[in-house]
Amino acid sequence: MTNQEIETPSERTASPWRKRLWALAFIAAVGSFVWVQLPDGGYPTDLTRIGAGRPTLVLAHDSNYTGGMTVMSLMNEIRHDYADRVDFLVAHLGMADGQAFARRHGIRDGAVVLFSGAGQKLGVIDQPQDTEALRRALNEGFDF
């Protein structure tokens, strides 16, 4: 056997299973990264829940603007403190029902609307700037 006929480890090709495992590992890593980048906690978009007996906070959110996403991150920070007393909803302004909601209440991306359990509009906060402003609005609006 000559030196040219001896196969070195670097010249060996990976088995088809090894290639598939690496591909799956890569896809899993990318998928995990994308998952971590998604906003925390999903918010229901069923606006028919307004007036169903529980106080409700509705965020107007348009994915083309940053205001709604900023307010959503504030909501994520305080949601656990109010979740047992308040329904948190999102009106997506890219959808027909969200657009109708925004027109009916004269609001835009990032606005928060508070409703009583009976569905009466209690107030609107246009893009709260911090969690304290959002907490204050919830506490005053819902008498907590």
Image (cartoon, rainbow, N blue to C red):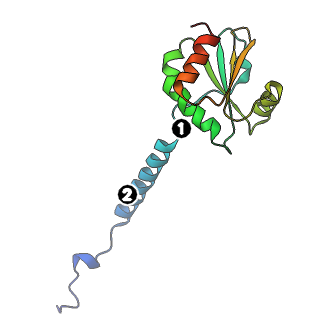
Q: Residue 39 carries which label?
A: 1
Q: Where is residue 108 in the image (x, y as percent from the top left)?
A: 74, 34
Front position in the image: 61 or 67:
67
Task: Look at mark 2 in the image and give the residue it sits on.
Answer: 21
Q: Residue at x 45, y 54 (%)?
A: 27
50 shown above or below 64: above
Question: Is 111 placed above or below 85 here?
Answer: below
Q: In which quarter of the image is residue 73?
A: top right
Give residue 76's position: percent from left, percent from top. 52, 28
Measured along the vertical axis of the image, is residue 92 above or below residue 47?
below
| The N terminus - image quarter | bottom left
Question: Residue 88: which disc?
Answer: none
Indicate left or right for 99 with 10 as reference. Answer: right
Give how far across and how far down residue 61 sits, in percent.
Answer: 67, 35
The x and y percentages for residue 11 are 28, 79
> In this image, 94 relative to 104: left or right?
left
Q: Where the C terminus falls, by quadrant?
A: top right
Instruction: Kindly indicate the quadrant of the structure image that contains residue 117.
Output: top right
Residue at the (78%, 30%) spot, across then down: 102
Identity, as a three-letter code, of the amino acid under mark 1: Pro
Which residue occupies 66% across, 42% down? 63
